[in-house]
Image (tube, rainbow, N blue to C red):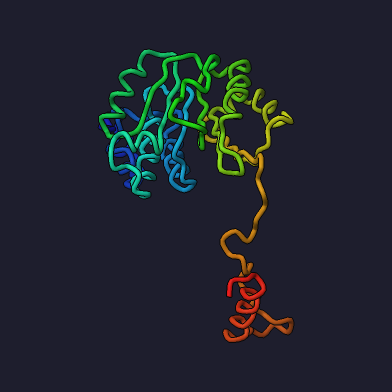
Amino acid sequence: MIDDREGYFQQFNAPIFEATCKEHIDTVMNHSTPYYGPLLYWLVRSAGIRFAVEIGVCKGWTSYFIAAGIKDNLNRAGLDKTVESTSHNGHYYGVDISGIVVELEEKLRAKGLPATMVQKDSYHMTKEDFPLASMFHLAFIDGWHSRQHLLKEFEILYPMMAKGGTGYIVVHDVYGWVAEPMQEVLKDPRYKFEYVRFFDNYGLAILRVMDDYIEDPKHYWPQGPEPDCINEDGTYRTEEDMQAELAQRKKEAGLE
């Protein structure tokens, strides 16, 4: 639990942010990625992510948020009835060369989170290090910030990522240590991404894997957008008129 010994929340009143930290396995806030932990939690929740890997875990700041998001997704889907079913239906893997991973795994599992730590140099990780994951929906890279390691991590992880726009690779320090090698990644023809980058806290990139993606603008609403409500002469259309248009579209889309 974050005990706020540094007085962060006394100085900066942020009740929602504070609430997200109360169950954390660490006692001190991470100052290089303070907001990216909760951001990753909500990315995991909003994208329905069940299998994730993190490269470079430090003291487990973002590890907790990612693993907690996976557990909450499983709970929402009714897939966390037993410890075994939870781990097989969704799992967090952390990769770090430091011996602290043993303690972190214990702390995460004590919270009931489906988590496994792999003590290994990410440069040498293989698919066999992640036996419960047939693929990853999320990879968070924040390990050794060298060109050599970043490029190798992408080479290893990209084939393991879920395709069709359902896999996300998140990278920290994209306006810091790895700014230059990230440009190489983004220009590499082997990879297909759409992405967004944030400036603050040394920069964060969220890359969506677009291999095998099929554009389907009518995925949720086959009848298309809401009808235009203003006529050419500037007057408003009637509700009946717009409903009639929607009914016709639904019929053409085979929904009725």
Q: In the image, what residue occupies the spot 43% across and 45% down?
A: 45
Residue 247 visible: yes
The residue nearer to you, when weighing 31 against 130, is 130
In the picture provided, is 158 more to the left or to the right than 131? right
Identify the image quadrant of the N terminus: top left
Point out residue 238 in the picture as x, y percentages from the top left corner: 60, 86
Q: Position of residue 245 (x, y in %)?
A: 64, 79
Camera-nearest residue between 103 and 124: 124
Q: How many marks?
A: 0
Which residue is drawn at the image coordinates 66% and 42% (left, top)? 212
Instruction: Describe residue 33's horizontal placement relative to residue 2 as left or right.
Output: right
Residue 117 x, y percent position in the rendering: 39, 22
Look at the picture and state if 252 lies above or below 38. below
Residue in the picture at 45% in, 38% down: 40
At 51% from the left and 34% from the top, the residue drawn is 136
Residue 202 found in image quarter: top right
Q: Say left or right for 178 vs 61.
A: right
